[in-house]
Image (cartoon, rainbow, N blue to C red):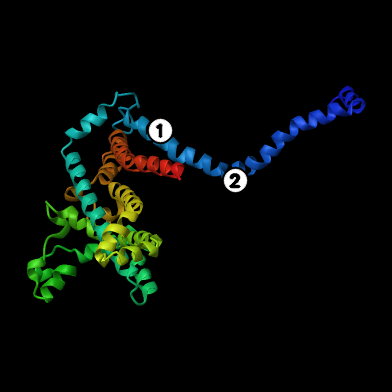
């Protein structure tokens, strides 16, 4: 502020008050949002760079002609997305992913809901059972994959270990099978470790849903003559639709990008090929960044098809409350 301005404000106090009032509303508003903005700005920068920035770069590579490490990026007008379906291994990878997703999601939902139902009935040592059921979720897919590779060893009875050896000891040899090496249903067996690992998490979601249903509703149904099964079917389960939808989205996006579990059990075998394994092979084994980025883009679209409608539904539900 210049000396002349200071002199004017000294001669006219009203002018100084008007200037301060002009600045005060902005400062008051800034005090409300500026600290929060400064607090979350590192996260905003990190997400913008390492999420959306890398998504943009991956899409750029997928739309390029860089099929080796020395060629230029260029622009191929989406030709990679069409040519990928001409590769012999890609349709099989998509089929395996869909089979794995169907078995994994259905199995984890059913087993988790059943365990939550047992918990809701008030069994003894409930806290201990909750810990036991949730413990597998604390184990990485790599660690559980190593263990389940031994359990699902497809060796014949004379060299059997794991489940096949157990079936042989119990004289249930007819249950022995090839597990994940079965050409038709191998990916269904591959979903068993994932079901074991995630069913406890689904149980926790459903148990919270069960406990959130008011007891008055259940008692009213019982007074009207409803059996316990009808109470759950017509009163409790309809209240759990948001829980089921949330679990479906979480399990679906996990299954569509599964990688470490399959690598730990089967490695890069064509019989257990899924899109994540295919992307790894294209980028690191065949040194084809464009094809690898194309597969990653397909995976992104598949996950977005699940997640975006859920986010829209969640926002609309919050607004209607």
Who is closer to the viewer here, 205 or 155? 205
Q: Which residue is mark 2?
A: 39
Label 2 with label 1: CB-CB less than 8 Å: no
Does 149 appear above or below 94? Answer: below
51 horizontally vs 267: left or right: right
* x, y percent for residue 74: 34, 24
* x, y percent for residue 229: 25, 64
* x, y percent for residue 189: 18, 58
Does 212 appear above or below 89? Answer: below
Q: How many marks?
A: 2
Task: Characterize the local packing of mark 2: few (<14), some (14-19) or many (20 or more) Cα atoms within 10 angstroms.
Answer: few
Q: Residue furthest front?
A: 224
Mark 2 to mark 1 CA distance (whole Å):
26 Å
Q: Which residue is mark 1?
A: 56
Mark 2 vs mark 1: which is more N-terminal?
2
Which residue is located at x 14 percent, y 62 percent?
Answer: 154
Which residue is located at x 29 percent, y 49 percent?
Answer: 252
Who is closer to the viewer here, 119 or 62? 119
Which residue is located at x 18 percent, y 36 percent?
Answer: 87
Task: Characterize the local packing of mark 1: few (<14), some (14-19) or many (20 or more) Cα atoms within 10 angstroms.
Answer: few
SS state under label 1:
helix
Does 169 appear above or below 22? Answer: below
The answer to whether one can see residue 35 in this image is yes
The answer to whether one can see residue 142 in this image is no
SS state under label 2:
helix
């Amino acid at each position: 502020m210049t000396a002349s301005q200071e002199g004017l404000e000294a001669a006219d106090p009203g002018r100084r008050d008007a200037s301060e009032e002009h600045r005060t509303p902005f400062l008051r508003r800034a005090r409300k949002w500026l600290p929060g903005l400064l607090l979350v700005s590192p996260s905003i920068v990190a997400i913008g760079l390492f999420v959306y920035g890398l998504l943009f770069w991956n899409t750029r590579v997928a739309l390029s002609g860089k099929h080796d490490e020395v060629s230029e990026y260029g622009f191929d007008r989406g030709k990679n997305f069409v040519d990928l379906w001409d590769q012999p291994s890609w349709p099989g990878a998509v089929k395996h992913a869909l089979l794995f997703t169907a078995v994994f999601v259905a199995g984890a939902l059913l087993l988790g809901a059943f365990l939550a139902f047992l918990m809701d009935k008030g069994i003894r040592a409930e806290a201990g059972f909750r810990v036991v059921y949730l413990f597998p979720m604390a184990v990485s897919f790599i660690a559980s994959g190593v263990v389940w590779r031994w359990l699902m060893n497809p060796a014949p009875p004379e060299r059997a270990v794991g489940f096949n050896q157990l079936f042989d000891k119990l004289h249930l040899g007819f249950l022995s099978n090839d597990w994940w090496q079965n050409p038709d249903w191998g990916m269904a067996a591959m979903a068993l470790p994932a079901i074991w690992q995630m069913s406890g998490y689904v149980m926790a979601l459903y148990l919270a849903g069960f406990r959130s249903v008011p007891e008055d509703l259940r008692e009213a149904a019982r007074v009207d003559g409803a059996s316990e099964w009808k109470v759950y079917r017509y009163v409790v389960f309809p209240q759990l639709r948001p829980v089921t939808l949330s679990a479906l989205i979480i399990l679906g996006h996990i299954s569509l990008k599964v990688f470490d579990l399959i690598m730990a059990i089967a490695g890069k075998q064509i019989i257990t090929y899924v899109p994540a394994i295919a992307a790894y092979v294209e980028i690191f084994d065949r040194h084809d960044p464009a094809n690898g980025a194309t597969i990653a883009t397909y995976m992104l679209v598949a996950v977005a098809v699940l997640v975006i409608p859920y986010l829209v539904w969640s926002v609309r539900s919050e607004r209607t409350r």
